[in-house]
Image (cartoon, coloured by chain):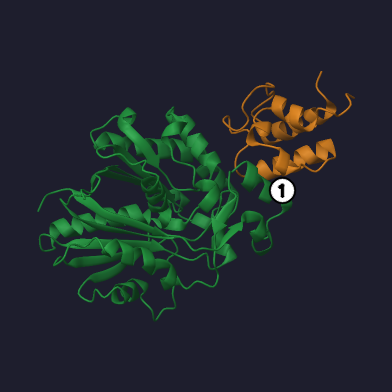
Chain colours: A green, B orange
Amino acid sequence: MNGATTLESIESFLPERSVRIEDLAGSLGLRRAEVGVFRKIYGLDRLRFDPELGLFDLVLPAARQALKALPQGRRIAYVIYAHTMQTLTPPHLDAAQVIRDDLGLPDAEAFAFTQQACVSSLGAIDLAGELLRAEAPPGSYALMVTGERAYSPKIQLIPNSAVMAEAAAACLLTVDGPGDRVRSHVTRTLGEFAAGLEMTREQSQEFGKVYGTVLGEVIQQAVQEAGLRFEEIDLVIPHNVNLVSWRQTIKEMGADPERFFLENVPHYSHTYASDVFVNYTTLRERERLVDGHHYVLVSVGLGATFGAMVITHRRPTA
Amino acid sequence: MASAGIDDVRAWILGRHPERTAIAADEDLIESRLVDSLSFVELVYAIESASGVEIDFDTIDIQDFQTLSSIEKAFFATTPIA
């Protein structure tokens, strides 16, 4: 079966509790100058973080909302839980299957997708599309969900890069539906940075050196494979890692900074694999997504995978 | 004439980049990667050590760290010339 992957419903959820990064200085062991650099150089300020909220309370609201768009009589064939940290639950719990069961979808295949870290959500959409085309009955749907807790300072602070925050998202997708059409998906994995959070100072420095160049190339390649020129892209909808690395990337690309939606960075910070969907829903609520216009969803996962997906927005008809 | 403080900051940056012998006052330190994400915090401490004053982050912006000239203007403007 051929046909394009289409995104039929994208929803996001943010815990209500909002803190400033200086409120986390104690638990993260940040010195005064580090907080200052995160705030004024990296552009971080507030983020959502609620240690009282359970994992499934975080993940399920957006998933339930996205499922409302499933047409009557249609079936969810796959529930894919995309997350960054490989272990989110005790070993006796398979989080993807708990999510599937809580959503009342016992017939769906449920599994996790994590190897691309914070860009796993784009990879999961690509994989879901491939599975729907390859083996699911025509007219089937898939549900990709994200959302994970910053459950330890060790995974909340990426030294010199980011302070991780909490959010969740869900994307209902199918093949050749009326929703946003996926035109291309490109990833590049640089295995030399596989140590991720455990990288040495030299590896981190090298990663910083190549980051902007590689990310720019991946974005341009995705645009090219979508049959478009970058000038035809309405907005890049990025991850919220920090403003410095985006400035570097934009400079490397020689692109117009206005084309990059960075307004959520000081409000939400980097929410693992959820950023691009949180940003997408912000833009939709502000009516900044235009029917027929093209957008690039972009993120980077430690480990290190760079990913970009070009979509054409299609506004649902009433 | 540059203040002694900014000379200390210049020397600190050059000390981390043995391949360089000079830095122009208007050279972009971030774009040229003379200061990268791993060294921002250390740059802050180098500036504080040279100026003898803690940086008030509520009153500064990323532009204040962009070049040696902007660092001098933001953090050493009132330092008496040695």
Above or below, A59 relative to A104? above
A214 left or right of A52 in image: left
Q: Nearer the viewer, residue A18 or A223?
A: A18
Q: Quadrant of residue A142?
A: bottom left
Circle 1 crowding by C-alpha within 10 Å: few under 14, some 14–19, many from 20: many
Residue ranking furthest to the top: B1
Where is residue A251 shown, x and y percent of the image? 48, 30
Where is residue A185 shown, x and y percent of the image? 28, 45
Where is residue A111 shown, x and y percent of the image? 30, 68
Q: Quadrant of residue A312?
A: top left
What residue is rendered at 13% in x and 62% in y? Answer: A135
Q: Quadrant of residue A310?
A: top left
Above or below, B50 relative to A35? above
Q: Chain of mark 1?
A: A
Above or below, A262 relative to A141? above
Which residue position holds label 1? A33
Where is residue A69 shown, x and y percent of the image? 24, 60
Residue ranking furthest to the bottom: A92
| Secondary-structure class at tag 1 | helix
Q: Nearer the viewer, residue A266 or A191?
A: A266
Question: Looking at the image, can residue A134 be seen?
Answer: yes
Type of residue at label 1? Ala
Q: How many numbered marks are there? A: 1
Residue ranking furthest to the front: A318
